[in-house]
Amino acid sequence: MPYLELKDIFVQRKGEIHLDHVNLSIKKGEYIALLGPTNSGKTSLLNVIAGLKKVDSGEIFFENKNITFMPPEDRMVGYVFEDYNLFPHLTVLENLLFGVKVRAGNIEQATKEALELLRMMHLEGREDAYPNELSGGMQQRVSIARAAVAQAKILLLDEPYRALDAKIREQMRREMRQIVKALGLTCIHATHELEEAMIVADKIVVMNEGRIEQVATPEELFNNPKNYYVATSIAENNEIYIGSNKNKEFLPGLTLENLLEKTNQKISVKEELVALIRYSDIDIMEIVEQSMLYTQKPDMFQKIEQQKNKESIILKGKVVNTRLLGEYVRFGVKLTSEPSTTLYSKHLLNLAMQNYKEYEGKEVQIRIPYSSIKIFKK
Amino acid sequence: MPEIEFRNVTKRFGEVVAVKNLTFTIYDGEYLSLLGPSGCGKTTTLRMIAGLINPTEGEILWNGRPIHHLHPSQRNIGYVFQNFAIFPHLTVWENVAYGPEVKGFPEKEVEDLVETYLKLVGMKGKEDEYAVSLSAPDKQRVGIARVLASGAKTLLLDEPMGALDQQIREKFQDELRGIVKKLGLTAVHVTHDQSEAMAISDRIGVMKKGEILQVDSPLNLLFNPETIFVNNFIGEANFFEGIVTSEQEGYLKIELYSGEIFTVTKPTHGFLPGDRVVIGIRKEFPIIYPSDGLSRENYFSGIVEEDRFVGEKRRVIIRLKYDQLIEIKNRNTQQSFKHGDKVDIEVPSLAINVFPYPKEGLAEAVSVT
């Protein structure tokens, strides 16, 4: 049974469509990430759930009850904004208890719970501090604790880390998931960052121009992107034009016909097609072999590599450029045979890459697993 | 000849120490970036080079002479800001011509200068457009042409890509580095973006809390960090405590508190048997195998806690002896483990960095705040 269900939600303002017939169903205790660029509808969707934005048509159900027209204050939704929205003149504890006081709830019980939450969130002893005495990360935890104390049934987070430094953001993401899971909250978290969505969420909702493009676990999303939009928004891809001819070689020695046979796929070729291959799916053989130098278990390594070779196309090329990108190194390889496209290969750093620049101008072999070549209409 | 030399430079604002005892050199013709978390003192450092503020202690030498002997106008410095210091109501041409005209250059020379630099930054053909109507990258191109036309030999860049979209940044980085190298300029570039610093710089100075921890090539920062902070700030690393058990010509054998033995083949110096040390292991380097039950040197054994797919890699968290955790970024996304799987983790001996145990404690040494 879905906990929260959105049915055919449509919202427009001044002729501009904010949400375009959105259907989404969320289970209790799920951590959902809404992933999309600015103006893709993430914030609109959160606002609709919180009751801060009226829908033009469609219905919202919460625990099977229609809440489409329920005022926001009755929805038991905890909304954590980018700037945390804590009352600056209240202490941490007073902030946590604010909602309970307004509702004339049991203060004694709530205080006990609040102190327990602060302990869980590593904020023990900070109950009398004012928000401006806390770091951004701490303020955010307080803001989540407040939603929990107010017995929010759904936690909504809108780009919660935008204001934080990159390094702190990394820590916060993991902490956030742990906290939400430990409290058993149902959470919807809007972000424009793929890695953030991947780290925090059970399921990712990919949004684009007010529509939902795909709902999937991080792994499903990566292995089976539904369309061109999703595939290109979750990774950097080499894009190769195929057109509508099944028998034309789009890579040296490989036609669409061959590929479909090797991967047991059926695609009807009516439209113009393109092949997408992720930078990170292409191996440069010399570099893979080099990393063997470092292992004490060469047999196991060899076995894995042989298996990969069998399931891949191996092509000759020349490295035409290299670039260090933080924890990745990227190589541009121009294929020797026609069609002599330049393909990019992106490798997570390894020890063999200290000499990555020496590969410039070198002849290399690249390996592309057949299963990593995805065909889409554009 | 060293161009800009910092000697024990400290800057205080009231009680706050913004920059502490900086000593480093920016060489002639070098592209140097200053990288660090917000509040680390990188912009203060840049402003001192520009002469916008003065050090509280220490001195900055300019070609061997104390900088305060030079009027800011004699320093030939061009300052490029994130938010494009250009005149919005002037055309592209007028913006670039402004500096040389103020200096009273003859008309022909102004024209030549403007033409040269507009061509260099790829803005030829857009001379008559108003600055206000330009795209963000074009505004920044004009900003750079403008400081170059005023005769700048040293470029100071404060987050110059801050307002540019991710897609255009890489191209812009290449353009900017190309211009600096072509003209033989010296550039000092402040950024918080690691990829940007790596792509654009000859060397990067990593700063933390007002101090400069290491000034080095991007590759050396990645592979040979000198401090625990740098090892974890440039990427991410796991840290374990142990004791040096033997030392031979700089090669160490280390026994962790949890009992594992590691051989370090990367040369070290100054460590002796009995020293308390921390080893740092970047999260990309270890290799995970299903356990075969044997124990070896340079291996951990553990039980998989979580294996999470995060796009182009998997993040695997493994519980080791005594509830220690290690996190590994696994490029092999086809290799997945289940919670509870027994695994062996190989740490190549060249992947281990050794640090003396920090006086301030491990957590503080890693912390960015």
Image (cartoon, rainbow, N blue to C red):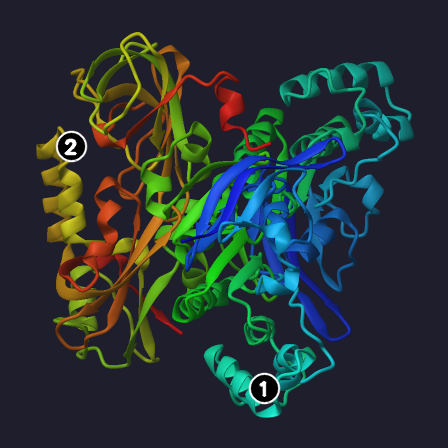
Determine whether the residue tagged by mark 2 lies in a helix, strand or loop. Answer: loop
Q: Position of residue B207 (x, y in %)?
A: 52, 39
Can you tell which quarter of the image residue A258 is in? bottom left
Callout 1: chain: B
* Residue drawn at point x = 27 percent, y = 43 percent: B334
Q: Position of residue B180 (x, y in %)?
A: 44, 66
* Residue found at the far top of this picture: B274
Residues A359 and A271: in front is A359
Q: Which mark is residue A194?
A: none
* Residue drawn at point x = 87 percent, y = 23 percent: A105
Determine whether the residue tagged by mark 1 lies in a helix, strand or loop. Answer: helix
User: For mark 2, what is the residue?
Assistant: A295
On the picture, is A241 further left or further right than B324? left
> Callout 1: 10 Å neighbours few (<14), some, many (20+)?
many
Residue B211, compared with residue A37, is above or below; it is above
* Residue drawn at point x = 14 percent, y = 60 percent: A364
State which quarter of the image contains the C terminus of chain A: bottom left
Q: Position of residue B311 (x, y in %)?
A: 40, 48
Query: Does the rendering let one see residue A59?
Result: yes
For the residues tagged 2 and 1, is the chain the same? Answer: no
Mark 2 to mark 1 CA distance (whole Å): 63 Å
Query: Does the rendering let one see residue A63?
Result: no
Q: What's under tag 2, amino acid-wise?
A: Thr
> Callout 2: 10 Å neighbours few (<14), some, many (20+)?
some
Residue A47, compared with residue A122, is above or below; it is below
Q: Which mark is residue B110?
A: 1
Residues A85 and A326: in front is A326
Q: What's under tag 1, amino acid-wise?
A: Val
